[in-house]
Structures are given as C-alpha cells and as structure tokens.
Image (cartoon, rainbow, N blue to C red):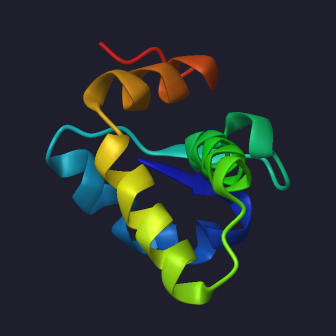
Amino acid sequence: MCFSESDSRGIKAIAPLIEAVGAKVLYLSPYSPEFNPIEHWWSQLKAFLRQFSPTTSKRVDTLIATAMDLIDPQHLHNWFAHCCYCPS
C-alpha cells in the first residue's frame, strides 16, 4: 500500500496490521505525483473527457462511469510499473 508522508502519523498506527497480512507499506515523498498511480488515471480521464466536451454534469457523470468501466488490470499494472512499483 502506498501513502504520502503527510498521512504518515495515522498510517504508522495501521502499518503493522498491513504488514501482518504480507503487504508492504510504501511512503511517498510529499508532493510526488509522478509516483502516484492515481495521477496517471486522472490524466487519462481528463483526456477522455476532452474528447467529448461534455456540457452538463449528467454527461460528465456518464463519461466518468464509462471511463471507469474501461479500466482493466493491464492499465493498473502499467500505472504502477510507470511509478516504479514493479508489480508482478
């Protein structure tokens, strides 16, 4: 699991629980969007929305739902790999 350093106070309390199930806790440096996989999704989502130029909030909601449906495991793998998290 990845957390930013700004969250570290609360995370330190649950880190042992995360590690107890075999997961690794990684702390990101502050303000490091290049190491945050969600930033890659936001970038793709914004590009997707620009293709359709929605003019209503309902259309934006529909397009976001569509974009979420288009995410597949390979996208997730690529985003984490691009952030140097080397998923297997």
Q: Is residue 37 above or below residue 49?
A: above
The C terminus sits in image quarter? top left
Q: Is residue 8 above or below residue 75?
A: below
In-front residue for pair 7/62: 62
Q: Position of residue 15 (x, y in %)?
A: 38, 59
Is 7 displayed left or right of 67 in the figure?
Answer: right
Instruction: Residue at the far right: name it.
Output: 31
For residue 7, above or below residue 38 = below
Q: Nearer the viewer, residue 87 or 42?
A: 42
- For residue 30, what is the image quadrant? bottom right
The structure residue drawn at horizontal position 41% and vertical position 73%, both measured from the top left corner, is 13
Tell me which residue sits at (31%, 57%) in the image. Answer: 16
Q: Quadrant of residue 76?
A: top left
Residue 46 rendering spot, x and y as whole percentages: 70, 53
The residue at the far left in this view is 21
In the rendering, at what x and y percent does residue 14 appear? 35, 69
Q: How many numbered marks does the figure carry?
A: 0
**Residue drawn at x 60%, y 75% as measured from the top left:** 9
The residue that appears at 48% across and 77% down in the rendered structure is 61
Q: Residue furthest bottom?
A: 57
